[in-house]
Structure formats: C-alpha cells, structure tokens
C-alpha cells in the first residue's frame, strides 16, 4: 500500500483576485516521483510552492482549505516554516549556487542549523555530493568557487545542497529545463535513485520526462487538478478528454 505523505483537500490559492488553485484534492504517495504537468499558467509551480510555503513570500496571497504533510497542517498557525523548509527542500529551474566554494555551498544549510564540527561537516558534504552524483567530479576542487562549474554540475550541486539538511521531500521546479540532454539525463537518473529515500515532486514541461521517470502524474489546467493517477495510466488511458488533448499535443 502506498503511504500518503502530502494531502490537499479543497485547497485554494488566490493571488489577489486571481484564483490560481481551485479546490485541489490530491494524496501524494511517499518515496515516489510525482510529476506535475499542464500548460503554462495552469498553477503547477504555484501548487509546488504551496507545499513548502514559498508563496508566503508573495504579497496578497490567500490560501484556504487543507494541506497536510505527514498528517500535520502546513498552514497551521504557529507552524515553524524554517523547519518545514528543512524537511521539504526545493531545487529551482535555474541553478542558483551561492557565490562561494563548492564545500561552503553544501555546508551552508547544516551550518545554519548549528553544525560546526569540521569532521561532521566534511562527512555531510561528502555524503550529499555523493547523493547528488557529483562527488567524483568535484572532490579535488571543493575549495574552488561553485560558479566555475557547468550548468549541469551546478544543478547537481544545488541538489547536494538540498540533501545536506537531510530533507524528507524534494520539490523540483523544472530543474532540467535549462540543461543539455546529457545533464538532463544525469538528473533524471539521479531522481530515480533518490526516490528510494525521498519523495520527489517535480514540475515539468517535458512530457517525455514525466513519462520516463515519474510514478504518478497530475495534470493541471487553469488552476484545476483535472486528473491524477499512475503515470502509465495517464499516458496510455487518460480518463479526461482534456488530459488526452494535452498529452497528445493538441494544446498547450
Ligand atoms: N507571484 C505571482 N503573483 C501574482 N500572480 C502569480 C504569481 N505567480 C503566478 N501567478 C499567476 O498564477 C497563475 C498560475 O501560475 P503558475 O506559475 O503557478 O503556473 P505554471 O503552471 O507553473 O506556469 P509555467 O509553466 O509557465 O511556469 C497564473 O495566472 C500566474 O499569472
């Protein structure tokens, strides 16, 4: 039986007057890859950011309904958002390494959480870089600037940085859209590897990518969740005509 880790019930989000998420109902299973697909502006990224409260930073946002993570309300008053974001990490479309060394990028989060012991930090940095499949490429240049890495390496470094605080869930917002095919395939392989230990939720515009690596697919359209199910089913036998039109390229 799949174990639900995140659950939305009648979840609505408004940017001022713009009703960007409409009555979202979804149960996301643990330790699987869920792909969020749909045409531009349908609310995929908004939904992704709602999960670790990144939308909190945007003025005029109103959220109603329920979103639970491991049974606890994400928007409960008094919820520790820093702790939530430690447990639910995020990787963005554009790799955004800090302008500091490779080592310091990865050690940044653990240091913020109070880890100062050098041996312990070394261990976390190595583990995280190995976890993100970039250790072999950077182990001899840990003190060099992260900005000297290629785009694909920078994105894997950002994944290592996310892993360093030992998260539970990884949110990926079009994490490969700026990368070449080889880097993209490395990150896809990595995601498939990481799902043994982490729950991954990814926004992608790349239908082949969703079909290749995700276990479940959610199709959004104009703020609604039109269809959610096993990726194989969604791509072979969509239940909704709108899903079918989208995945066969008739719009979007
Ligand atoms: N920061 C914001 N302030 C106001 N409105 C926003 C903001 N971000 C998104 N929106 C609006 O919310 C709706 C959903 O946008 P969102 O970015 O979630 O869509 P998306 O499906 O991820 O699109 P894309 O594939 O183009 O990234 C759109 O109408 C968009 O204009």
Image (cartoon, grey):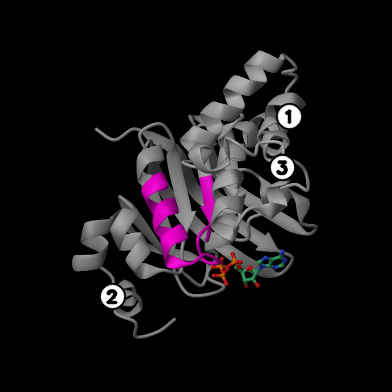
Nearer to us: label 1 or label 2: 2
Residue 27: percent from the left, percent from the top?
39, 44
The residue carrying pointer 3 sits among few (fewer than 14), some (14 to 19) or many (20 or more) residues within 10 Å by Cα, namely: some
**Residue 206 vertical placement versus 4 (above, below):** below
Q: CA distance from mark 3 to mark 2?
A: 48 Å
Visible residue check, residue 194: yes
25 and 209: which one is in front?
209
Nearer to us: label 3 or label 2: 3
Quadrant in which the C terminus is drawn: bottom left
Q: Which residue lies at the image location 65% right of the left edge and 52% below the top edge?
A: 63
Q: CA distance from mark 1 to mark 3?
A: 40 Å
- What residue is disc 3 on? 144
Q: Which residue lies at the image location 55% right of the left edge and 34% below the top edge?
A: 163
* 100 relative position to 75: left or right: right
Say if mark 3 contacts mark 2, CB within 8 Å. Answer: no
Residue 78 is tagged as 1
* Circle 3 SS class: loop
Say whether disc 1 or disc 2 marks the residue closer to the N-terminus.
1
* 220 relative position to 60: left or right: left
Q: Which residue lies at the image location 29% right of the left edge and 79% below the top edge?
A: 248
* 74 relative position to 29: left or right: right
- What residue is disc 2 on? 244
Q: Which residues are magenta?
A: 171-191
Looking at the rendering, the quadrant in which ligand 1 lies is bottom right
């Amino acid at each position: 039986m799949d174990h639900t880790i995140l659950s939305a019930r009648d979840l609505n989000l408004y940017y001022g007057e713009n009703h960007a998420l409409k009555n979202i109902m979804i149960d996301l299973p643990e330790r699987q890859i869920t792909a969020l697909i749909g045409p531009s502006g349908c609310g995929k990224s908004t939904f992704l950011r709602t999960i670790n409260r990144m939308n909190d930073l945007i003025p005029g946002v109103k959220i109603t309904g329920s979103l639970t993570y491991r049974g606890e309300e994400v928007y409960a008053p008094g919820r520790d958002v820093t702790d939530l974001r430690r447990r639910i990490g995020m990787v963005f479309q554009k790799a955004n390494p800090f302008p500091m060394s490779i080592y310091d990028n990865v050690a940044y989060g653990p240091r913020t959480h109070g880890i100062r012991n050098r041996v312990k930090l070394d261990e976390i940095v190595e583990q995280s870089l190995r976890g993100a499949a970039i250790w072999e490429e950077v182990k001899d240049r840990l003190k060099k600037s992260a900005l000297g890495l290629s785009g694909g390496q920078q994105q894997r470094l950002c994944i290592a940085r996310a892993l360093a605080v030992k998260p539970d869930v990884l949110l990926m917002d079009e994490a490969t859209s700026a990368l070449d095919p080889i880097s993209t395939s490395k990150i896809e392989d990595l995601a498939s590897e990481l799902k043994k230990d982490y729950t991954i939720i990814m926004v992608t515009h790349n239908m082949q990518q969703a079909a290749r690596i995700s276990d479940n697919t959610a199709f959004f359209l104009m703020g609604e969740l039109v269809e959610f199910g096993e990726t194989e089913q969604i791509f072979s036998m969509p239940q909704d005509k709108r899903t079918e039109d989208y995945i066969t390229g008739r719009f979007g």
